[in-house]
């Protein structure tokens, strides 16, 4: 399967059909190159499973070997920068975000109230110009980057989305173009 160029189509997106592949790709994007064994340890999976799914991601053009890194059977993998990858990246990030939220909700009943006090799942529709949306994203990133890590802190996943709502006629128009 050659790695497709340009925008990913349905065939390419099949490479992300397995939720573990989405998690692996998100981990490599967040933490950089890694081996199947290290990915397995971080995700609580077997190295055989992560090795298989890394090879599948490579076959679909999402990851590649890191040249000159690793010895013997130790194989290092990194994400592949792709042209016109914005929509693909957003789909992968949304799928990973859904997986993380679903995993959290499965264990939320057993969490202490002090951890649950900082949880919010909400949305708000704003009217923004494209420039205002860019400014909003920039300000959110700055706010998140300025938060200090304190002793006794826990890891929290912060998910946020900023995207234009498609008007009903634009949605119908896009469906008719397919």
Image (cartoon, rainbow, N blue to C red):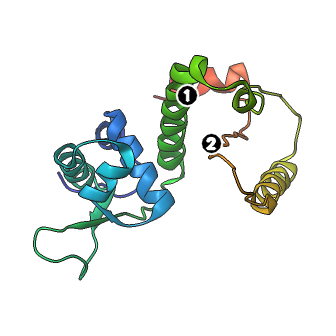
Q: Is residue 7 visible?
A: no
Q: Name the residue beneath numbered marker 2.
A: 157
- Quick one: 174 or 9, which is closer to the camera? 9
Q: Name the residue beneath numbered marker 1.
A: 104
Q: Locate the C terminus by quadrant.
A: top left
- State how far apart marks 1 and 2 are (Cα): 10 Å
- Identify the residue shown where x is 53% and y is 30%: 98
Q: Decide: is 114 above or below 53.
A: above
- Identify the residue shown where x is 41% and y is 43%: 23
How busy is the neighbourhood of tag 1: few (under 14 within 10 Å), some, or many (20 plus)?
few
Question: Dot 1 lies on which element?
Answer: helix
Farthest residue in the bottom direction? 68
CB of mark 1 within 8 Å of CB of mark 2?
Answer: yes
Q: Is residue 4 left or right of residue 153?
A: left
Q: Is residue 149 left or right of residue 14?
A: right
Which x, y percent locates residue 115?
Answer: 70, 32
Which x, y percent locates residue 49?
Answer: 20, 43
Question: Dot 2 lies on which element?
Answer: loop
Among the two numbered marks 1 and 2 on one chain, the one whose residue lies closer to the N terminus: 1
């Amino acid at each position: 399967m050659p790695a497709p160029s340009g925008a990913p189509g349905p065939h390419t997106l099949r490479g992300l059909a397995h939720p573990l592949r989405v998690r692996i790709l998100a981990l490599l994007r967040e933490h950089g190159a890694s081996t199947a064994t290290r990915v397995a340890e971080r995700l609580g999976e077997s190295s055989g499973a992560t090795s298989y799914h890394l090879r599948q991601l490579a076959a679909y053009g999402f990851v590649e070997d890191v040249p000159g890194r690793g010895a013997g059977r130790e194989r290092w993998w990194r994400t592949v920068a792709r042209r016109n990858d914005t929509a693909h990246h957003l789909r992968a990030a949304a799928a990973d975000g859904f997986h993380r939220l679903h995993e959290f909700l499965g264990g939320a009943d057993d969490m202490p109230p002090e951890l649950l006090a900082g949880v919010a799942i909400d949305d708000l529709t704003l009217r923004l110009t494209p420039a205002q949306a860019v400014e909003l994203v920039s300000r959110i990133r700055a706010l998140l980057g300025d938060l200090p890590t304190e002793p006794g802190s826990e890891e929290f996943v912060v998910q946020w989305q900023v995207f234009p709502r498609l008007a009903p006629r634009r949605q119908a128009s896009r469906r008719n173009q397919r």
